[in-house]
Image: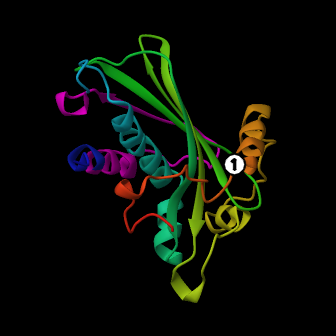
Amino acid sequence: MYPMIRFLSGLASARRAPRIGALDPHVSTHRCMPWDIDPWMELNNGRTLTLYDLGRIPMAVRMGLTDVLKREGWGFTVAGSSVRYRRRIKVMQKFTEVSRMVGWDERFVYMEQSMWSRGECCNQILLRVAVVGGGSGRKGIVPPVEIIRAMGQDIVSPPLPEWVQAWIAAEGTRPWPPVLPPVPAAERTRDLPA
């Protein structure tokens, strides 16, 4: 189940917090609850992705992005991500999330988030995020420069770090749709292509 109470609490805190610029970090503190864990009593790797929402969306509130999305009728969607897990987060352990926008290109905004506990980074995610049109008949991806302008900020993207550029290049070689292995007839469903 989605952590709605924690999510709404984070939104309320973000609305009361000072505004931040598009490139400023947002810091939030969380606790690994019993319903966030896997059988080994630590933060479930899938739940980690959900808990990153609790940093990313309040960050968007503080920088004014959610106001722009609402005004323009745009949507905010994750178009790709890569996670690196390094340290366990145990049940009831507190941790701090740091969320920030790294930069953008002509189509996507790149965000980095990390979870920290006791001075060590536990995991980190790189996200490619798209803002998509919906209102005023506009469809497709909204160019990030237009989004930044709509937020009332007159800035250009800093150069994307080399590791982010390498990830973008690697993603460009990945086939889409994925190439499926041969699926036995007994296991084939109507959801799979013929």
Residue at 22% across, 23% down: 39
- The three-letter amino acid code for the residue at tag 1 is Arg
Magenta-highlighted residues: 8-37
**Front residue of this view, candidates 121 and 119:** 121
Q: Position of residue 146 (x, y in %)?
A: 70, 68
Q: Position of residue 37 (x, y in %)?
A: 25, 27
| 1 in magenta | no
- Picture mark count: 1
| 21 in magenta | yes
Q: Position of residue 70 (x, y in %)?
A: 46, 72
Q: Is residue 193 left or right of residue 10?
A: right
Q: Quadrant of residue 164?
A: top right
Colouring convention used in this rendered image of the protein: rainbow
- Hey, which residue is sitting farthest left in the picture? 34
Q: Is residue 36 above or below residue 169?
A: above
Residue at 70% across, 67% down: 143
Secondary structure of residue under mark 1: loop
Q: Is residue 121 left or right of residue 150?
A: left
Q: Position of residue 140 (x, y in %)?
A: 62, 75
Q: Which residue is mark 1?
A: 174
**Front residue of this view, candidates 47 and 65:** 47
Q: Is residue 136 above or below residue 174?
A: below
**Front residue of this view, candidates 21 and 5:** 5
Residue at 51% across, 59% down: 77
Q: For mark 1, does the 10 Å Cα neighbourhood hold few (<14), some (14 to 19), or many (20 or more) residues?
A: few
The answer to whether residue 64 is visible is no
**Front residue of this view, candidates 66 and 126:** 126
- Hey, which residue is sitting farthest front in the picture? 185
Residue at 65% across, 44% down: 23
Q: Is residue 171 left or right of residue 21?
A: right
The answer to whether residue 74 is visible is yes
